[in-house]
Amino acid sequence: MAGDDHVLVVAPTGSGKTLAAFLSSIDRLMHAGESEGTRVLYISPLKALAVDVERNLRSPLVGITRAAARRGDEFREVTVGVRSGDTSQRDRRALVSRPPDILITTPESLFLMLTSAARETLRSVDTIIIDEIHAVAGTKRGAHLSLSLERLDALLETPARRIGLSATVRPHDEVARFLAGSARVQVVAPDSPSRLEMQVAVPVDDMTQLPAHPSTASDSSDDAPRGSIWPHVEEAILERILQFRSTIVFVNSRGVAERLTARLNEAYADLPARGKKPHRPAPLAAPRPKSWVAARSPTALRPSWPAPTTARSAKISAPASRTTSRRGGCAASSPRRASSSASTWAPSTS
């Protein structure tokens, strides 16, 4: 990361590759002289990821600054800015009048900056970090980004160094060529064998002699017949949900996902009547008043957050998102359709 060559880093999610890319630039910026423009450009194809990176980058900066102050080192504070489609006009003007050392943006926002007066703030860029490069490599959006990067290099006295980051991209040589063309690219791809943890669990002792579940003792409907395995499965899933902050449940059809969502909400509401007190894990931050249980498809590509409805009811909304869950909730997924999503309110489990 601290060298002069272009670098493509392929490492598993959570390995710290994004922070490593920033740290080499932060170390250089803290000991460099004052600059009139942006020095490091971070490009993310996901707008939400760009905002998260900006938020998560400020904590290391505070820690590094305090450590340097305690040691008595001479340094200057490193500033961070975000430019995306949600950035207000006031903030955009501030980015032009006071360019940050590190600018976090998206491919589309970079294109807009290059076609406006804001491009003057990019004339001092020396490092470009492209995160989630697999999301744009080989696509029209990636071709558009490559054109913007070449336009940016045309503004600079020396072409900027490019760092590509990904967790899943293959093949490495082709993506390296996409990153920097014919220039030399150092590929950093340490071995990362998959570690699979799997457990086969049966909610009853004998599946040939299914006992009647308390929740179906007075239920004569066809959906939950006496001796069915489903009430026991639902109770086992609910116990797992209450033990963790986030749970993903995969099922084989949309109908099962919707019924399971409703049954889980009903089972949770019936816990006090059955004399059971749900386990509540310690909250990560301020506790939320409610959480939700959602049925959602794993084949969808774009995030959406369906509006919740009242307890014991379900609502279908589209478009769906890739499988996602909030703290204290559960996502039950069906591979049948990418446009189905059902969500209901459940009492807080966080």
Image (spheres, rainbow, N blue to C red):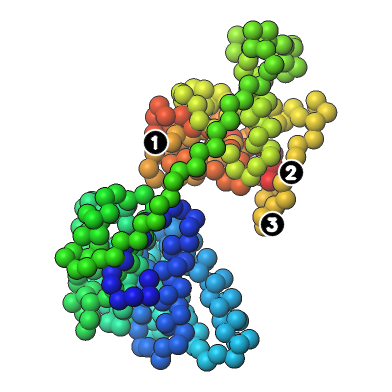
User: Which marked residue is nearer to the observer: mark 2 or mark 3?
Assistant: 2
Q: Are marks 2 and 3 in contact (CB under 8 Å)?
A: no
- Tell me where residue 74 appears, x and y as whole percent: 52, 92
Is residue 206 placed above or below 95 in the rendered structure?
Answer: above
Q: Mark 2 points at which residue?
A: 280
- Tell me where residue 98 appears, x and y as whole percent: 41, 84
Secondary structure beneath dot 2 equals: loop
Q: Can residue 54 be seen in this view?
A: yes
Residue type at mark 3: give it: Ala
Left/right placement of residue 148 relative to residue 243 reads left
**Neighbours of disc 3 within 10 Å: few (<14), some (14-19), many (20+):** few
| Residue under the point 39% across and 45% down | 302
| Mark with earlier residue (3, 1) | 3
Secondary structure beneath dot 1 equals: loop
Q: Mark 1 points at which residue?
A: 299
Q: Name the residue under label 3.
A: 286
Image-quadrant location for residue 37: bottom left
